[in-house]
Image (spheres, helix red, strand yellow):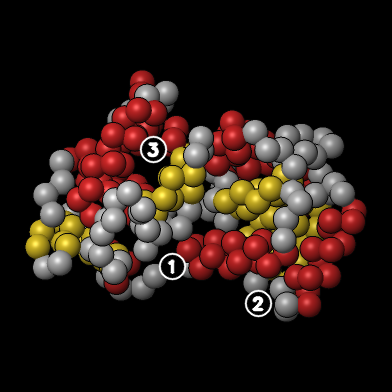
Amino acid sequence: MTRVLVVDDEPQIVRALVINLKARKYEVDAAHDGASALELAAARHPDVVVLDLGLPDMDGVEVIRGLRGWTRVPIIVLSARHASDEKVEALDAGADDYVTKPFGMDELLARMRAAVRRAEPVSGEDDSVVVTDSFTVDLAAKKVNRDGTDVRLTPTEWHLLEVLVRNAGRLVSQTQLLQEVWGPAYRTETNYLRVYLAQLRRKLERDPSHPRHFITEPGMGYRFEG
């Protein structure tokens, strides 16, 4: 049974989430502030955390950093904040996904299921090969094949592809991509991402102008969908 830790200081939201999650056979713990959330996470070891950013004792980003100091548990941020820079800050701190209030319960549940699924360990070597309807990525061999033919990628294109594929289904922020592929000095060079994503789409997407696999989240980052 999947255990969920709900962290929110609005009693009506906590109550709605607890009722809906328990009705779907989840085990649920609830915390109303950051300190309680960190204590509960350490004591109960949840499978996924649903976290509001606006807490009474500390910012939700501090809670994310506190959790990431010892666990890779999936964290879904739930917040009324709409500014993209606040979303990016949460993602850079280690959140896995972001849902803006007001939200639909079905959407939140779907994102929770996806986050838990991605966190499950995959046995054997199958996880090193990612297959889409357009191309295949072999992470171990560092090869990409499209329609039976190897696709030549530059080292930078490969590195960018690898980061996105290893985070399949998860939004990877612009800052994280730039730092991982080019280094800390390039954290603001977002034009690099536009150029290289366009090159990857041209080489791998069936219709580069309507990408199915390399998705742009405007102002925030990119997501690879298999």
Up-down relation of residue 114 to residue 22 (above or below):
above
Residue 24 vs residue 196: left or right? right
Q: Distance between the residues labelled 2 and 3?
A: 34 Å
Q: Does any portion of residue 192 appear in the rendered image?
A: yes
- Of mark 2 and mark 1, the one earlier in the sequence is 2
- Where is residue 183? Give x, y as percent: 33, 28
Please tell me which residue is depicted at 76% across the width and 34% down the height of the picture.
58
Residue 220 in the image, given as x and y percentages of width and height? 51, 38
Quarter placement of the N terminus: bottom right
From the viewer's perspective, tell me whether residue 56 is left or right of residue 202: right
Q: What residue type is labelled 1?
A: Pro
Can residue 41 be seen from the camera position used here?
A: no
- Using residue 82 as the reference point, say whether residue 12 is left or right of it: right
Mark identifier at residue 121: 1
For numbered disc 2, what is the local secondary structure? Answer: loop
Q: Disc 2 designates what residue?
A: 1
